[in-house]
Image (cartoon, rainbow, N blue to C red):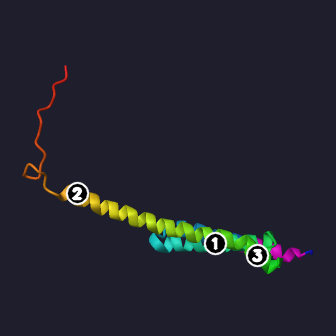
């Protein structure tokens, strides 16, 4: 099926606009969650247009769309769950180690006994 060139030119223009907006996020030195939210939104919009139009996914059957799009989405969910679990493990270990450091030592005073420094010739 032949698609009019006008569609591709409009999408190319949109990609250029979204890339400009992504550049402006850095130009205006936005920081924090706003910065990363905007960058991810522009990235997903560009990727969506590329997949839909330039890879002709917009004109495919639903079964093919689902076969191509569902596995990466499932992987994203699983990676997100692993990241949450990894953060929980890191914070739990960090709290445990901090708790161990704050305990007083067995010989009293909370400080390790100092040993004399060895002389080097």
Q: Which residue was labeled with disc 3? A: 65
Q: Secondary structure at mark 3?
A: helix
| Label 3 packing within 10 angstroms: few (<14), some (14-19), many (20+) | some
Observer-nearest of 97 and 6: 97
Q: Which image quarter holds the N terminus?
A: bottom right
Residues shaded magenta: 3-14
| Label 2 packing within 10 angstroms: few (<14), some (14-19), many (20+) | few
Q: Which residue was labeled with disc 2? A: 100
**In the picture provided, is 99 more to the left or to the right than 88?**
left
Is residue 10 magenta-colored?
Answer: yes
**In the picture provided, is 118 more to the left or to the right than 75?**
left
Q: Residue furthest right?
A: 1
Where residue 107 appears, as percent x and y from the top left, is: 8, 48
| Label 1 packing within 10 angstroms: few (<14), some (14-19), many (20+) | few
Q: Which image quarter holds the C terminus?
A: top left
CA separation in Å, label 3 and label 1: 12 Å
Task: Look at 33% across and 60% down and name the residue there.
Answer: 93
Task: Look at 78% across and 80% down and name the residue there.
Answer: 62
User: Looking at the picture, does residue 116 appear above or below residue 65?
Assistant: above
Q: Secondary structure at mark 1?
A: helix
Occupied quadrant, residue 90:
bottom left
């Amino acid at each position: 099926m032949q698609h009019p060139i006008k569609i591709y030119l409009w999408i190319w223009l949109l990609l250029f606009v979204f890339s400009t907006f992504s550049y402006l996020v850095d130009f205006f030195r936005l920081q924090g969650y706003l910065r990363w939210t905007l960058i991810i939104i522009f990235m997903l919009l560009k990727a969506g247009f590329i997949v839909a139009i330039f890879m002709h996914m917009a004109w495919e059957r639903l079964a093919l769309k689902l076969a191509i799009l569902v596995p990466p989405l499932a992987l994203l969910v699983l990676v997100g769950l692993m990241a949450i679990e990894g953060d929980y493990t890191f914070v739990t270990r960090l709290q445990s180690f901090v708790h161990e450091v704050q305990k007083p030592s067995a010989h009293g005073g909370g400080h390790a006994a100092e040993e004399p420094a060895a002389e080097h010739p």
